[in-house]
Image (tube, rainbow, N blue to C red):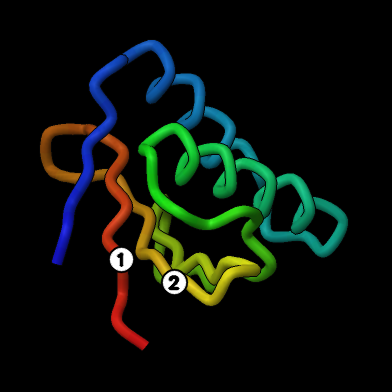
Amino acid sequence: MRVNTCTDTRICAALLAMLVATPAAAADDAALLKDLTSVIALLGLPCGQVVSATPLKDDDHIATCRDGNRYRVFINAEGRVVAQRLKS
């Protein structure tokens, strides 16, 4: 399993703020999908666009991409945004 970490802390902090600030309301689902798409792209992983997201807990989501890839996007113990590719 490949794990990527975000090295630019300013970008990670901004993305984390967007993820935390996004409530689970249906109107904000599009914003969450866009944020997860941005996180995955900034980590250099193939995705294209996140089409669905399943929350596991705070700051921890399963993102499903249009191209079929799935990632667990979360904040690790060091406070970094991480995306782990999940096997289908």
- Asked if residue 9 lies left or right of residue 29, the reply is left
Q: Secondary structure at mark 2?
A: strand
Residue 16, image quadrant: top left
The C terminus - image quarter: bottom left
Q: Which residue is mark 2?
A: 70
How many dots with numbers?
A: 2
Residue 58 location (% of width, % of height) = 42, 55
Q: Which residue is mark 1?
A: 85
Q: Is residue 55 above or below residue 48?
A: below
The amino acid type, in three-letter code, at marker 2 is Arg
Residue 87, image quadrant: bottom left
- Please tell me which residue is depicted at 28% across the width and 29% down the height of the picture: 6
Residue 81 location (% of width, % of height) = 31, 39
- Please tell me which residue is depicted at 38% across the width and 55% down the height of the picture: 73
Q: Secondary structure at mark 1?
A: strand
Circle 1/circle 2 CB separation < 8 Å: yes
